[in-house]
Amino acid sequence: MERIALKLGYLGTNYHGFQIQPPSGPRTIEGDLFEALKKLDIIEGRTAANYSAAGRTDKGVHALAQVVSFDTSNTHVTPRMINSMLPDDIWAYAQAKPDLKFDARRDAVSREYRYFLVPPTDLDLTSMRKAAELLIGVHDFSNFSYRDETESPIRELKRITIATKKGRPFVVIDIEANSFLRKMVRKIVSALRMVGTGMRDLTWIEALRDLRLTEGIGPAPAAGLILKNVSYPGTEFEEDSYAKLRIHERLKADLDFHATLTEVLDDMTNTLKV
């Protein structure tokens, strides 16, 4: 028996989040992954395999570096082997063989998300950066999340960077923390956007952070969010070059399709402009 840590990417558009649902429930990333692992005789079930995952992305959220870990007696596990049983919008591209105590969730020291924000014309990035600085450190993020009442709302936010994407109409927001609460990244993005448009100010962010004010913040749309990285000190992942090549080809085809569709929609929008 050996321990496998598998690095996954996926496009979350067609899935009801990462976490597996009951058999009659909606389709999820984890559900399709378990099905593939069982068909390949890699695991028999979640409990027997001592399975764990680094995070639980929401419906419509994407990932480039989700990590799962499990025990297996199959000595021939490779990312390309697993990809043969996965749909095109889920893929494995690297793996590690850590010790048997490795846990993809508990052993992660940080998670990094990236959000692509379509900016309104009056977005003030300087104000957004000042607001972001107020959230760095250890705080109670109850106002910036949905959470189970049994779960601690205390998190350490390590970094927020806000930059424009050269040649593209997006503002890129990178957020790193030890771990995240449900919808925490998307609520932070919404709050920063509200400051950037002048709807709210820095004192509002401080009041939310310090729990002097309770206010529901709607999360930013899921489509712009990617789980970019999960860090494990001392764990080395070996990338499968063939799997990466095939994934790159598939994503490039998707990119060409959506670039064409963007032009079609732009032409239609301009034609119908009142």
Image (cartoon, helix red, strand yellow):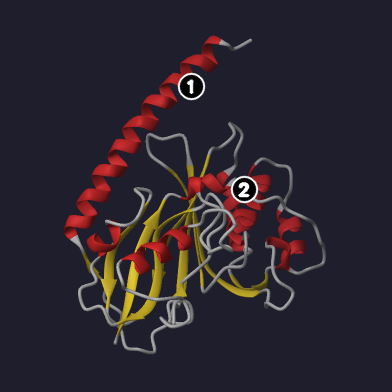
In the rendered image, the vertical position of residue 47 relative to residue 63, given as above or below: below
**Residue at 37% in and 29% down:** 259
Q: Earlier in the sequence, mark 2 or mark 1?
A: 2
Horizontal and vertical percent for residue 221? 59, 45
In the rendered image, which residue does mark 2 sit on?
A: 220
All told, the count of numbered labels is: 2
Quarter of the figure with the N terminus: bottom left
| Secondary structure category for the residue under label 2 | loop
User: Which image quarter: residue 260?
Assistant: top left
Is residue 50 visible in the rendered image? The answer is yes
Horizontal and vertical percent for residue 29? 46, 58
Does the CB distance between marks 2 and 1 fall below 8 Å?
A: no
User: Which image quarter: residue 107?
Assistant: bottom left
Measure the alpha-carbon separation of dots 2 and 1.
22 Å
In the rendered image, which residue does mark 1 sit on?
A: 265
**Residue at 25% in and 78% down:** 74
Disc 1 marks a residue whose amino acid type is: Leu
Quarter of the figure with the C terminus: top right
| Secondary structure category for the residue under label 1 | helix
Disc 2 marks a residue whose amino acid type is: Ala
**Residue at 41% in and 42% down:** 165
Is residue 232 visible in the rendered image? The answer is no
